Amino acid sequence: MTEVSALTALGAGVLSFVSPCVMPLMPAYLSFVSGLSIEELRESEAGALDSAQRRHKVLLGALGFIAGFSTVFVLLGASATVIGSSLTGFRFQLGGWIITPAQIAGLLIIVFGLHLMGLLRIPWLYRERRFSIDAGTGLMRTYLLGGAFALAGRPALDPFWGSF
């Protein structure tokens, strides 16, 4: 990696961190990842956890979060690469027309745009499914939180990352 691209990646990371989508979540994120309340994170009294124990809990939670976040992004990137490379030569003929994956994707974007405008109602897009996992505490909990954050927070950062 060249110095310029490393600097660009660092700048992009800092800008995405201070974005309005991410920065307001930081106190809750640190509290959830560490398992400590905001007050406990600020405390320095003798009866509370000492600073080394607090740092250790926060670091361990952050590493779990990063592992979950990274797993999701690696899986998304790898699956996009596999799907994209398998569709490279995909074409089919309909009458005298040759249809490519890009044309199909464009048609889907138009259909979803019409749905968002309210001109076309697609009932299955109104469904909601929820599930609950008791991940307990510790590393597994923060790992799952990181994965969920990557899936849920990715659309907010896509326009920013897509500009690079």
Image (spheres, grey):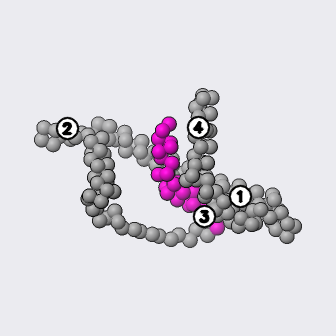
Tell which tag, 4 or 3, sits nearer the viewer: 4
| Pointer 2 residue | 98
Can residue 108 be seen in this snapshot?
no
| Foreground of the two, 82 or 120 | 120
Please report the residue visible at 34 percent of the width from the left and 41 percent of the height from the top: 86
Residues at marks 1 and 4, CA–CA distance in whole angstroms: 25 Å
Q: CA distance from mark 1 to mark 2?
A: 55 Å
The relative height of residue 160 versus residue 51 in the rendered view (above or below) is: above
The residue under label 1 is which amino acid type?
Answer: Val
Disc 4 crowd rating (10 Å Cα; few below 14, some 14-19, many 20+) is few
Secondary structure of the residue carrying tag 1 is helix
Alpha-carbon span between mark 4 and mark 3: 28 Å
> What residue range appears in magenta?
137-164
Compare marks 1 and 3 and give the one earlier in the sequence: 1
Name the amino acid, label 3. Answer: Arg
Tag of residue 141: 3
Circles 1 and 4: CB atoms closer than 8 Å: no
Q: Earlier in the sequence, mark 3 or mark 2?
A: 2
Q: Which comes before the other along the chain, label 4 or label 2?
A: 4
Counting from the top left corner in percent of width and height, residue 98 is at 19, 38
- Quick check: 126 left or right of 8? left
Circle 4 sits in a helix, a strand or a loop, which is it? helix
* C-alpha distance separating marks 1 and 3: 13 Å
Q: Look at discs 1 and 3 and give the one toward the viewer.
A: 1
Residue highlighted by disc 4: 9
The image quadrant where one finds the N terminus is top right
* Residue 40 vertical position relative to residue 18 in the rendered view, above or below: below
Quick one: 82 or 100, which is closer to the camera?
100
Magenta region includes residue 139: yes
Q: Are marks 4 and 2 in contact (CB under 8 Å)?
A: no
Residue 58's label in the rendered image is: 1
